Each structure stands twice: as C-alpha cells, then as structure tokens.
Amino acid sequence: MSRILLPVLLFILVGCQERQLQKITEKDLIDRMVNQEIPELSEISILTEDGDIISVDSLRTLEKSKAYFGDFYVNKKNEIVQIVIREKTGEDEKLIHRLNQKLNEGPEVKTVNIDCNNKVNLLQRVFDRDQEMRRGKSQIDPKIDHENLEIIVSFLEKCGMPTLAEVDDVQMAAIWAVLQHAPAKYQSKYLPQLEKSATKGDIKWSVIALMKDRALMYEGKPQVYGSQINNGELYQLFEPEYVDQRRQEIGMESLKTYLLRFHIEFNVEQKRK
C-alpha cells in the first residue's frame, strides 16, 4: 500500500470510529464516578487528541503532572470504551471540585431494618460478604459495598457501637472494614465512635489511623499519620517532623519504613514534643 494512502486510510477509520462514539456529559460522568460505574483502564482504549494510543502506565505518569484531563466516550450501548487525554483547563478544575464533593457524599444511604439482638450473625454476614469480594477472584461489586454500608450505618444508628464483650474481633472488623471504603462523610461521622472503641481496646488504633487520614484527605486537609498516598506521592502531612512520634504512640512503625513499600523516600528529620 502507498505510504501516502496509509495515513489517509487511518484518518478515515479513526473518523468513522469517532462518529460512532459520543462524549458523555459532565452529569453522566459524575453519576458514574459516584456509583463506581467506570470500567478498569485496561478494558478501554486511551488516546491522545491526535489519536495516538497511550498505555495505562503512561497515563499514570501524565496524571502525576496534574496538567492533563480525560474526556470519556461511550458506544451505542452507552458503555465507556475510550478516553481521550488533553491538557487540563480551568473548567476541568471546576468539574474535579464538583466531582470530589459528590464522591464525598456518595450515593443515598437508606435505613434498613436491624435486629440489635442478632448482632453476631448480622455483622458476621456483612464481614463475609465484604471479604468474599476482596479475597476472591471476582471484581468488587459496588452494589454489595453499598448494601453493606446501609446495614452498618443503620446498625450504628439503632444499636450503637458494640464491644468485644458482645461480638468477637472479626465481627467488630465488619464495621471498620465497610466504613474504610465508604464515602468520606461516613468515615468522619463515625470516627469518634471508633476512636472510643480503640481507647477501650476493642479496635486497633492502626485501623483508626488509616480511616482518619483518608477522611482528612477527602476533606482536603493534611493527614496525621502518613498512611495515604496520592498519585504515587505522600499526601500532604500535618507537622511531618513529629509524625513518627504520633505513629509510635499507636503502635505503628516509622513512616520511612512504611513508605519504602511504595518506593517513596521520606527524609524529614524527626523530633519529639
């Protein structure tokens, strides 16, 4: 085939493909993000505006620069099949802000019937469903996560936080495991109850540290214990020179040791108050 005709043919094919795809609206994008209906990056094509293919690793690198944004496209079945990467604009920043607000709110959580006299069986079922998804070969099902969250929120509102005198450590883990991957507002709301449980020895402080840092990050505030990593870098940290003291007080290893697992260096000289 002629070297002249080949680019022309490719241009025609790409043009035909683009006419079959439709860019989703901002509202649709936000709704899909909130409901966790975005496919894995490995399952869709990632292109530049010029039509060049980008690998997932290359996209991750571009994301770190925070200078690029992606437009999502759906096929006739309304399935997301393509992302087109371009330079980020001021309007994109506003969209990201609105998206973060919605992600913090999450889908509506309804109250469900709870039998407080059946704490052991109820929490065990929630724990088993949560771990079956995460330890098995199946993909994470947002619907199951949401149903578990409705049960846990309803349980805490009606029955309060249980103790290890009422349930065992596995059933207690059902509560913090579900809240750990819930929208930030639920983590913030029930964190005081979890901290009281940690003070009594019913929950490990290290669990509370992870949830507290995550809630703070979602609120745009500095984290306290250094557990959260964003785009391959340590998320903003409150008084980093005292972080090891805070971590040591709740039985956690030094932050430098923790971050080595993620190939991140932490060389802030540590002090004590």
Image (cartoon, rainbow, N blue to C red):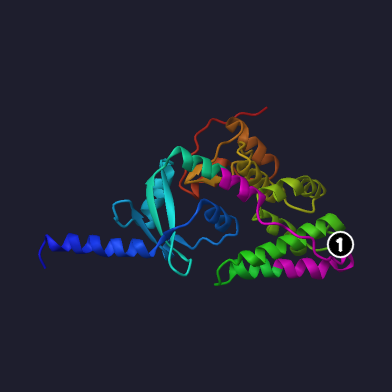
Residue 159 placement, left or right of 182: right
Residue assigned mark 1: 166
Quadrant of the drawing holding the C terminus: top right
Residue 222 placement, left or right of 47: right
Quadrant of the drawing holding the N terminus: bottom left
Q: Which one is in front, 75 or 120?
A: 75
Asked which secondary structure carries label 1, the reply is: loop
- Looking at the rendering, which quadrant does residue 272 occupy? top right
> In this rendering, is residue 106 above or below 234?
below
- Looking at the rendering, which quadrant does residue 87 occupy? top left
Q: Which one is in front, 255 or 13?
A: 13
Magenta part, dominant SS: helix
Residue 231 placement, left or right of 247: left
* Residue 213, x across and y down, in percent: 64, 43
Whether residue 101 is in magenta: the answer is: yes
Which stretch did the figure color magenta?
A: 98-127
Q: Which one is in front, 271 or 223?
A: 223
